[in-house]
Amino acid sequence: MDLLDQLDARLNLVRRTSDTHAIAACPVHKGGQEAHPSFSVHLASGHYRCFSCGITGNFESLKKLLGYNFDGVNLMPAIRRETNDQMNESVLALFRYCPVALADTGFSEATLLKFEVGYDMMYERITFPIRAPGGRLVAISGRAADGVEPRYKVYTGTMLRGAVDHNYAPRNKSWLYGGHLVPKGTPLLYVVEGYKACLWLKQHGVDNVVATMGTKVTPSQITHLQNLADRVIVVFDNDVSGRTSGKIVQQALLAQGVPATVLQYPGAQPDNLSPEEIKHLFNPAN
């Protein structure tokens, strides 16, 4: 017997909404008799959330909530434990919702879909898949949309099965966001700090751009930049941290024999630039 069968036997208004999710009347508020179901359960992990009363939990707490021994229940085989730095592609189905916060600031639906940007309704975070060279999924970063600290968390297979999430692990800073889309030997490569800046430039025609996922750049990332590009232009944020780190990246690349410059531009960060400014600034002739 699977989890959907057990939910159907113990909750009201149960219906499957996708391959991975079911919804039902919440067992917590209104005595389980709400007219419109708001209790969402992920059938692969047992993770749940009520979008009305806000209760959330994992598979263990679901068993306690419903007062039933689920030991014999089979979860959908949609998520497998990751090995080393690899995650199963199926976890992306958890975050298929549109990140409205990005759409409201000008990101197109086509851009968000192309780069698999999603939204985690459970933890209320915009999600960005991180891929190693070759394209394998190695992590998913969740960015808080409303200023909650810490701003970024890394998703692991353990967390996706309902355990406590973890802060950004150093191993995930081995890669460059978007680096798997850039061929080795690229004549000119732009490097920015964050996901939004990278996607904003891509949306406006700058394909040869990657992000370091923060101002703290690791030696491994420097090596990747060295292997990818003949020339690098650093476009970090226009604050003290960004300008300082941008110069450090420039000097590290120069020390490896890679021509590198820091781009001067107006505004606070690359994703504040207008399409016209991007067209003028991000020109191979610059």
Image (spheres, rainbow, N blue to C red):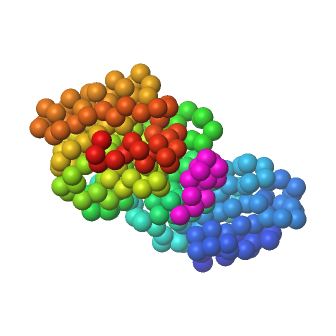
Residue at (50% x, 41% y) in the render? 273
In magenta stretch: residue 108? yes
In magenta stretch: residue 73? no
Taking depth in this image into account, of 162 and 94 the one nearest to the observer is 94
Residue 213: image quadrant is top left
The answer to whether residue 94 is left or right of residue 216 is right
Q: Quadrant of the C terminus?
A: top left
Taking depth in this image into account, of 261 and 173 the one nearest to the observer is 261
Q: Which residue, as the protein is rendered here, is positioned at the far top?
A: 240
Residue 246 horizontal/vertical position (percent): 32, 30
Taking depth in this image into account, of 227 and 171 the one nearest to the observer is 227
Magenta-highlighted residues: 98-110
Does residue 189 show up? no
Residue 270: image quadrant is top left
Seen in the picture, residue 275 relative to 79 is either above or below; the reply is above
Seen in the picture, residue 267 relative to 101 is either above or below; the reply is above
Residue 21 horizontal/vertical position (percent): 63, 68
Residue at (21% x, 29% y) in the render? 251
Taking depth in this image into account, of 80 and 104 the one nearest to the observer is 104
The answer to whether residue 37 is left or right of residue 43 is right
Seen in the picture, residue 143 relative to 96 is either above or below; the reply is above
Q: Quadrant of the N terminus?
A: bottom right
Residue at (34% x, 23% y) in the render? 244
The answer to whether residue 32 is left or right of residue 10 is right
Residue 30 horizontal/vertical position (percent): 88, 55
Residue 48 horizontal/vertical position (percent): 65, 57
Does residue 80 show up? yes
Say how many tags the image has: 0
Residue at (37% x, 45% y) in the render? 282
